[in-house]
Amino acid sequence: MRRLLALLLFMPLLAQAQLPLDRIRLPPGFRIEVLSDQLPSAREMAWGANGTLFVGSNAAGRVYALDTTSGRVRTLASGLQMPVGVAFHEGDLYVSAISRILRLRDIEAHLDAPPQPEQVGPSFPAETHHGWKFIAFGPDGKLYVPVGAPCNVCERDPDRYAALHRMNPDGSDLERVARGIRNTVGFDWHPKTGELWFSDNGRDLLGDDTPDCELNRITAPNQHFGFPYCHAGSVADPEFGTRPCEDFVAPVARLGPHVAPLGLRFYTGSQFPTEYRDNLFIAEHGSWNRSEKIGYRIKRVELNEDGSLKRQSVFAEGWLEDGEVWGRPADVLVAPDGSLLVSDDQAGAIYRISYEGS
């Protein structure tokens, strides 16, 4: 009965787009379908308290609300600068827009007449290079906000750049959480330990096969993860490698060179088989300057009880075929029914991956 209700919830949205989903390869028993293809440049996703799916965007400059019952898409804000990140907290929607964190108050009561976005907290750096931000509220009730390095590799104010910060919902008490992070565009908290895990995009222009992008976890305050001195735990930077890699926190997993990991989430639903519980799903946006493209898929990461890597594998792929790309996964999010949503900023789409059994 629960599975039937879940299918009815999403049924009006199915098969509305002519995207080549038959090319997507999934493990046995899983299927993928389109929720909407009407969200240009779709990036981070967040659920509202009443079941609204909020979606940020990159080049489109818009923030969307998707009604997963009717399929209706509303534009809540437009003309913003790369409003990639969205986070919902106590009725309000928070949006990242490069140098600003914006708040739309009591948003689900005003979807048809959205309030004017208001800035919350201090201004952040204005550089657009790695300036777009994935944001999320942690178990501590604080909003976590990254600031990427404004370059491929450089050494700029470490209290401000290449760091992860957090602040109160009203924008007060901004503090640094971790440093030496080139550009994280995805993070989540382990459902059992509460530790923060994040993806980090490796530097470019050292060749096709180095360095790897990273999966990291924070186990103590203000840990340093190596940038710009060391990459992927063992690759000394040819210009800034003045400190040994042993000085820094090594990644839990090396995800591959230039795969560009973005959004990631722990699987906390109950629809997938039990072996998927507490696994990490990572959206790999894909390489932009590698001679042979890599990424453009959803990665599954399994962890041991102590937080070490058990294995990583490809969960969903097919957006890249014979060097041609028709979609780029940007974020993943567990739906209330236990399915997994995937945003695709190239296709302007949201997909739903569900498990129906073998």
Image: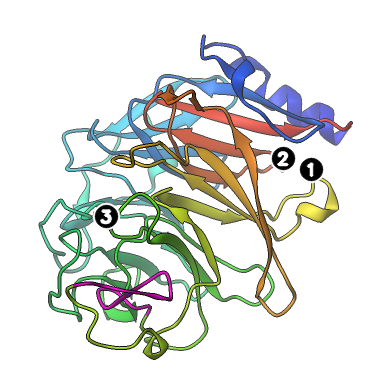
Residue 113 appears in the rendering: no
Picture coordinates of residue 260 (x, y %)?
40, 49
* Residue 238 vertical placement versus 263 (above, below): below
Quarter where residue 77 is shown: top left
Q: Nearer the viewer, residue 333 or 323?
A: 323
The answer to whether the residues at label 1 and label 2 have Cβ atoms under 8 Å apart is yes
* Residue 144 vertical placement versus 298 (above, below): below
Q: Which of 236 and 280 is in front in this view?
A: 236
Q: Which amino acid does label 2 sit on?
A: Asp
Quarter where residue 130 is shown: bottom left
Q: What residue type is labelled 1?
A: Gln
Examine the residues drawn in magenta and state their main secondary structure: loop
Picture coordinates of residue 179 (x, y %)?
31, 78
Reading the image, the residue beneath label 2 is 337
Tell me the crowding category of disc 3: few under 14, some 14 to 19, or many 20 or more residues within 10 angstroms, Cα based. Answer: some
Give the Cα separation between the discs numbered 1 and 2.
Answer: 7 Å
What mark, if any, has residue 204 been given in the picture? Answer: 3
What mark, if any, has residue 271 been given in the picture? Answer: 1
Q: The magenta stretch spans which residues? A: 225-238
